[in-house]
Image: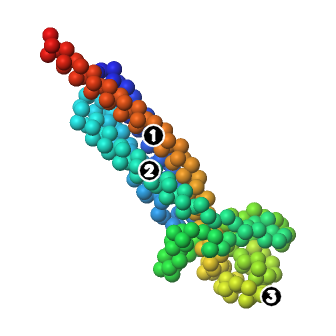
């Protein structure tokens, strides 16, 4: 029984360690370029990570002090948390499956359109109430001002590898055929009817294309990239966590079997 408890304790210690990358992924999302303005996935990830940490510590204490009921609570609670984590991983994978950028002639950067993304992500930015708050957050960043410092010539800008949000929010859509003056100042639109965003563009440095659908799409593209990166961490962690949980179940079962066999021998003698 002592040997089995030691094994269970070691397994729970591994589970404690596995909670760290989950919490870390949530904290990383809090500081993401897009996630800092759209806070949704971060807190479920952080909360799940903290709950896994607490439950794993409870299991470790139960194994160390040989508290059987605490180990049973650990096994049940950890099963629920693993199921929730698997569900979250599957959810993130499904909602980020779509959303690739579109290539424009003579441009190194990509253009993004709302229809390219899943309905769930589009609903995060569709209402004016939600977007007003997000737009206010975006306008306080330096992502557009940095472009003016880095690109003076039109061709240099056209060959730039812009982030999705810079492409969607800091300049008019390419199909509008505005004339480049600097990255955030454009004149002489040739085809304002090409897209409603062509009419939304403003040279006012506090407005730019923050009201454009292209800006919303760029935000979703950044969001999609950050979520997919975080999901890689979650996938690896949940696979290891499942293995650890199954080994822990086997160790607990063996411990109970040893305990029953010991009591049987004592009763027989």
| Helix, strand or loop at mark 2 | helix
Is 22 positioned to the left or the right of 209 in the image? left
| Helix, strand or loop at mark 1 | helix
- Position of residue 87 measured from the top left corner of the image (x, y, whole percent): 45, 54
Against 122, is 194 above or below?
Answer: below
| Helix, strand or loop at mark 3 | loop
The answer to which of 50 and 267 lies nearer the viewer is 267
Q: Which residue does the numbered mark 2 point to in the structure image? A: 85
Residue 189's tag is none
Q: Which residue does the numbered mark 1 point to in the structure image? A: 241
Marks 2, 3: nearer the viewer: 2
- Position of residue 66 measured from the top left corner of the image (x, y, whole percent): 25, 28
**Tag 1 near tag 3, CB within 8 Å:** no
Marks 1, 3: nearer the viewer: 1
Is 154 positioned to the left or the right of 140 in the image? right
Q: Quadrant of the N terminus?
A: top left
Q: Quarter of the image holding residue 187?
A: bottom right
The answer to which of 105 and 82 lies nearer the viewer is 82
**Tag 1 near tag 2, CB within 8 Å:** yes
> What distance separates the C-alpha of mark 1 from that of mark 3?
57 Å
- Position of residue 203 measured from the top left corner of the image (x, y, whole percent): 70, 83
> What distance separates the C-alpha of mark 2 from that of mark 3?
50 Å
Q: Residue at x 80, y 88 (%)?
A: 190
Q: Residues within 10 Å of mark 1 (few under 14, many from 20)?
A: many
Q: Quarter of the image holding residue 160?
A: bottom right
Q: Residue at x 35, y 48 (%)?
A: 80
- Position of residue 131 measured from the top left corner of the image (x, y, whole percent): 52, 77
Whether residue 131 can be seen here: no
Q: Residues within 10 Å of mark 3 (few under 14, many from 20)?
A: few
Q: Residue at x 39, y 28 (%)?
A: 10
Q: Earlier in the sequence, mark 2 or mark 3?
A: 2
Q: Which residue does the numbered mark 3 point to in the structure image? A: 190
């Amino acid at each position: 029984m002592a040997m089995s408890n030691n094994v269970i304790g070691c397994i729970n210690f591994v589970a404690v360690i596995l909670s760290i990358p989950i919490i870390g992924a949530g904290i990383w999302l809090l500081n993401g370029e897009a996630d800092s303005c759209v806070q949704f996935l971060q807190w479920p990830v952080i909360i799940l990570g903290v709950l896994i940490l607490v439950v794993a510590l409870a299991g470790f204490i139960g194994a160390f002090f040989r508290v059987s009921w605490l180990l049973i609570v650990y096994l049940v609670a950890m099963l629920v948390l693993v199921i929730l984590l698997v569900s979250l991983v599957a959810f993130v994978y499904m909602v980020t499956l779509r959303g690739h950028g579109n290539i424009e002639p003579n441009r190194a950067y990509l253009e993004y359109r709302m229809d390219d993304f899943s309905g769930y992500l589009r609903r995060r930015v569709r209402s004016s109430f939600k977007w007003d708050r997000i737009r206010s957050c975006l306008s306080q960043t330096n992502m557009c001002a940095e472009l003016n410092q880095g690109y003076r010539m039109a061709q240099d800008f056209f060959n730039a590898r812009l982030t999705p949000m810079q492409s969607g929010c800091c300049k008019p859509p390419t199909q509008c055929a505005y004339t480049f003056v600097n990255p955030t100042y454009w004149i002489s639109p040739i085809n304002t009817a090409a897209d409603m965003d062509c009419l939304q563009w403003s040279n006012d440095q506090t407005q730019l294309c923050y009201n454009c659908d292209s800006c919303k799409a760029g935000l979703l593209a950044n969001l999609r990239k950050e979520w997919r990166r975080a999901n890689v961490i979650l996938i690896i962690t949940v696979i290891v966590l499942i293995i650890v949980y199954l080994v822990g179940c086997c160790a607990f079962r063996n411990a109970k079997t040893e305990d029953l066999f010991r009591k049987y021998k004592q009763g027989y003698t």
